[in-house]
Image (cartoon, rainbow, N blue to C red):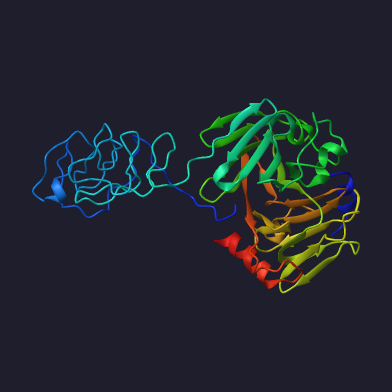
């Protein structure tokens, strides 16, 4: 994005994210709720055969000293420590072995092991999706590849830890970042997905190098890519990012952290550049500022930006600055709906001169820009903000047009499931 923000300041994956709690070896999760005999196992052995309430033969496997369910300390879900099963605690659908117990446990009466119990290596016991692990391709490219989702995401730690590419199959959902190195030029601010602090009046233009384009340290922690930026003395803050892909839902989850070196007030601000020519929509809030040069309309509680005929709009053009109400912003193009989901911000909590939904049509790209709440951050403190991305194929029954109730219903469903 170019200096258009200075001009505009005067203007008043497909499916649901599923949170999964996973128990690793040696961590107590919960006692079993399966229906074994009340004395179906001894304190050191396996379950009695078929939950015999008089107690079964001991084994070397995990046991429950109360109800014949799984033990929370040995990691075995009705299983022997070597991964075998107790006499009556057979996991019907693949309980985890001794490397990590199931989340709900096997039973003393032949009950099933925990659904989707996972071992320490992240493998799913009942056909659940394995974690998507970030891989270092080069110093300037970390990649998430999720074949089951037909999704590939790339991150460049050397260019502000921005997401440089998000592709579903052969379709680019965001405009790929093409700069060999970041130099603060307009060419390096017209692609990829980046992050700034808000309001822009604090730093004017160009964006703060330490946050937008400078090098971040990068490391993988399980399925998460952790990126840490340096502190900008100019604004007294830096940024960290935690990026992951939820394998079950094919959703990209990005957690941004603004870390303050001095007392400041700031709002988090995500900027993603998508190809021109689509249809943007979000739930209307209490206010919206836009120029008559944009084909913007409001109907049935939704704001629409029809970009289908605006591919020639250049930088420093008009911009939407709005208070949204539903905590989501959607963009329909080429049969896909790109959905950003975030916490809704009340008007009183918006950064000065900003909105929690902003859209900017640039030269060859359109910026989708959600913002979080404007917050006072003490010195050496931090705030976190999460944005979830989903790319969903638009069903043939959904009409992609301004005012389409089927499109807003579909987007709302995806955002709130």
Quarter of the figure with residue 379: top right
Can you name the residue that lies furthest to the top here?
139
* Residue closest to the eye, 329 or 230: 329
Residue beneath the point at 21% across and 44% down: 64
What is the tally of numbered marks visible in this picture? Answer: 0
Tell me the quadrant of the picture where the N terminus can be found: top right
Position of 149 compared to 292: left or right?
A: left
Q: Position of residue 285 (x, y in %)?
A: 72, 66
Q: Is residue 173 visible?
A: yes
Q: Position of residue 147 (x, y in %)?
A: 57, 42
Tell me the quadrant of the picture where the C terminus can be found: bottom right
Residue beneath the point at 73% across and 63% down: 281
Q: Note whether 301 is above or below 236 in the view shown.
A: below
Quarter of the figure with residue 394: bottom right
Position of 30 compared to 50: left or right?
A: right
Q: Note whether 112 is above or below 138 in the view shown.
A: below
* Residue closest to the eye, 18 or 201: 18
Residue beneath the point at 72% across and 74% down: 300
* Residue closest to the eye, 241 or 100: 100
Position of 288 compared to 104: left or right?
A: right
Q: Position of residue 8 (x, y in %)?
A: 87, 53
* Residue closest to the eye, 161 or 91: 91
Can you name the residue that lies furthest to the left here?
54
Q: Is residue 257 visible?
A: no
Can you name the residue that lies furthest to the bottom here?
300
Q: Position of residue 262 (x, y in %)?
A: 70, 35
């Amino acid at each position: 994005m170019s200096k258009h923000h200075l001009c505009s300041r005067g203007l008043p994956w497909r499916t649901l994210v599923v949170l999964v709690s996973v128990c690793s070896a040696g961590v107590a999760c919960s006692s079993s709720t399966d229906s074994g005999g009340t004395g179906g196992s001894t304190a050191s052995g396996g379950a009695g055969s078929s939950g015999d309430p008089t107690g079964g033969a001991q084994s070397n496997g995990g046991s429950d000293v109360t109800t014949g369910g799984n033990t929370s300390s040995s990691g075995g879900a009705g299983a022997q420590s070597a991964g075998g099963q107790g006499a009556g605690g057979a996991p019907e659908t693949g309980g985890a072995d001794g490397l990590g117990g199931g989340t709900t446990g096997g039973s003393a009466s032949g009950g099933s092991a925990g659904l989707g119990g996972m071992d320490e290596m992240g493998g799913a016991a009942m056909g659940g999706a394995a974690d998507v692990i970030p891989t270092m391709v080069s110093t300037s490219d970390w990649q998430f590849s999720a074949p089951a989702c037909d999704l590939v995401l790339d991150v460049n730690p050397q260019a502000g830890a921005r997401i440089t590419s998000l592709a579903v199959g052969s379709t680019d959902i965001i405009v790929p970042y093409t700069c060999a190195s970041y130099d603060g030029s307009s060419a390096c601010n017209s692609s990829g997905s980046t992050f700034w602090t808000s309001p822009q009046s604090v730093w004017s233009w160009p964006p703060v190098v330490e946050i937008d384009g400078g090098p971040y340290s990068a490391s993988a922690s399980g399925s998460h890519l952790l990126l840490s930026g340096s502190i900008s003395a100019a604004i007294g803050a830096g940024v960290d990012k935690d990026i992951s892909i939820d394998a079950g839902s094919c959703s990209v989850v990005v957690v941004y952290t603004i870390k303050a070196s001095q007392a400041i007030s700031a709002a988090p601000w995500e900027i993603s550049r998508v190809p021109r020519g689509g249809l943007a929509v979000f739930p209307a809030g209490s206010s919206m500022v836009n120029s008559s040069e944009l084909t913007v309309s409001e109907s049935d509680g939704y704001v629409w930006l029809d970009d289908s005929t605006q591919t020639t709009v250049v930088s420093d053009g008009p911009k939407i600055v709005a208070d949204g109400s539903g905590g989501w912003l959607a963009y329909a193009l080429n049969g896909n709906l790109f959905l950003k989901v975030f916490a809704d911000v009340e008007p009183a909590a918006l950064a000065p001169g900003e909105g929690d939904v902003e859209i900017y049509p640039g030269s060859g790209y359109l910026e989708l820009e959600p913002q979080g709440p404007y917050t006072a951050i003490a010195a050496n403190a931090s705030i976190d903000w999460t944005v979830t991305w989903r790319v969903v194929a638009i069903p043939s029954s959904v009409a992609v047009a301004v005012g389409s109730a089927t499109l807003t219903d579909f987007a709302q469903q995806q955002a709130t499931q």
